Amino acid sequence: MTNEPSLLDDLYREIILDHYRTPRNHQEMEAPTCSAEGANPLCGDTVTVSILLADGRVQDIAFGGQGCSISQASASMMTEYVKGRTVQEAGDGARAFQQMMTTGEPQDLEGFDDIDALRGVAKFAARVKCASLAWKTLEQALDGRAEPVTTDERTESND
Amino acid sequence: MTQTDMDVQQRLPFDLDRIRRDFPILKREIHPGKTLVYLDNAATSQRPVQMIAEMTRFYRDHNANIHRGVHTLSIEATDLYEQARQRIARFINAPRAEEVIFTRNTTEGINLVAHSWGRKFLQEGDEVVITEVEHHSNIVPWQMLRDERGVVLKYIPMLPDGTLDLDYARQVIGPRTKLLAVTAVSNALGTITRLDELIPMARAQGALVLVDGAQSVPHMPVDVQALGCDFMAFTGHKMLGPTGIGGLWARMELLEAMDPFLGGGDMILTVTMAQSTWADVPAKFEAGTPNVAGAVALGAAVDYLEALGMDAVRAHEVEITDYALRRLGDVPGVSIFGPPQAQDRGGVISFELEGVHPHDVGQVLDTHAVAIRTGHHCAQPVMAALSVPATARASFYIYNTTEEVDRLAVALEEVSRFFGVRA
């Protein structure tokens, strides 16, 4: 069988397929500090992100939902990146990711090496939304944290 | 070519090589060495050179605004525009050409009915019945009317095989039903609706019937009189015509009783600063300068289809669809949605490939120059009923060949390999 065209290899890097087949942190979380749901109505991709915060850090993160390989692999890679980082760093990562999708340029960010595999998606305008979904949902979850931030005891009811 | 393949090829009702020469885009190399396989015809068809030439000729030789002009070009343009209306009326066997209103597309035709008929004649508590397999364009206008006027909106559900639940239809269509709005062919699954059952049910209750003909008028003989419907909406771009032009047929007495759709030029009889009176049908529904060149070119598209014969167009699609159902059915991991028999379908096959999201299927097929559609096909309720987020959909038209179906099937096997679903 002939080799796939290189354009396709740009999109579906081996590490992306690996995250799609064996997603990390793909589970439900009992009592997240904050969470958000994201949907891409054009193709029906959905991603939920649940975060457990402690001392300004992402103690634990989980994602759910369904969608194409790009949206699900991006979500899986996002959770690996974000876990253990501060809220500030997580936000920086989300912004860097969207920058990467807009410009197609590598991002000089510590721990972003694997995520660079998704840079090829920037060449596929129709798929940028798939890749960005998890990161936008992450931002939404972290933004939601801002509202009840003073009322930690009520977080469960804010789900 | 296999023996079966040759048999199918011989049964096809017209000369595919000759037809394909009329569509230069089909020769396009999408990637080096890979010629286009266009299987997204339910979204929009390709265009023959004859239609494109007609549009060019209009702009080059006859261009002017229509109606009320005294100069030669305006009279020519008006004649061409009205001749196109006559050809389209004949194509769907409308009793009178003036009963065909030019619209932008099917969506506009349905919205016109909801606005001009629905808002005038429907009262709170009146019922409109639609179905679960409708395109969003035959759901949303009725939801908007419901929210505005208190009309009750009911629907006939889809059975697991993609057909409508006719027993349920008999219960839901009742004395309060004022309109049944139903598609002739599901765009998402290809299922042909049993209009022969549904229309008499509605008529027996004194209800009117709107048929969404977007997927039927381009693909099979359609006779609005034989169907016994009251409204039929369709679009040009799915039947070899340009984008931005479509038609709504309705019975004259309804059109005369309905209010205008948009207000403006061309749709009035008289205007004073105090009030206006309306022009006769069809001008009453065609405010502003219409898509004259589009209408003229759609007339040429209709001529092209009539020259082939709509029985032959349908016969070819049944053959191709039957072949594709068998060929795709043999690809490991492929599950096909909808009725198993080609006769019960338009030229549409919705499917999923085990372990690979439809979006990824479409992406990899594109690298093989195979163009299909993936997603919810503007029919999210159908996706919900099937419990899938999306499907992959291949849809056929007059120029598609069994070799193209083979290329789809081979490419699908490579998709499975690529994603490591099967060794």
Image (cartoon, coloured by chain):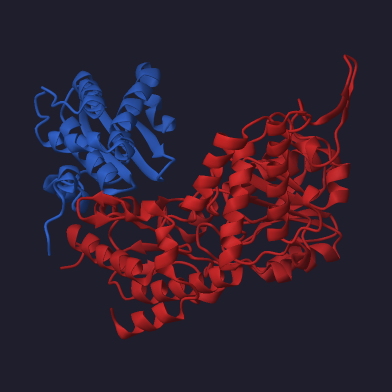
Residue at 79% across, 37% down: B283
Q: Is residue A82 above or below residue B256?
A: above
Residue A138 lies, with reference to residue B225, above or below; the image says above
Chain colored blue = A
Chain coloured red: B
| Residue B204: percent from left, percent from top | 85, 66
Name above or below for residue A104 compared with residue B309.
Answer: above
Residue B30 % position (x, y): 27, 49
Residue B140 visible at all: no
Quarter in which the N terminus of chain B is drawn: bottom left
Residue B351 in which image quadrant: bottom left
> From the viewer's perspective, is B86 left or right of A54?
right
Residue A47 horizontal side relative to residue B76, left or right: left
Q: Which quadrant holds residue B294?
A: top right
Name the residue at the front extreme.
B72
Q: Which of the 4 quarters of the picture holds residue B325? A: bottom left
Residue A12 picture location, percent across and down: 18, 47
Is residue A93 among what the camera can see? yes
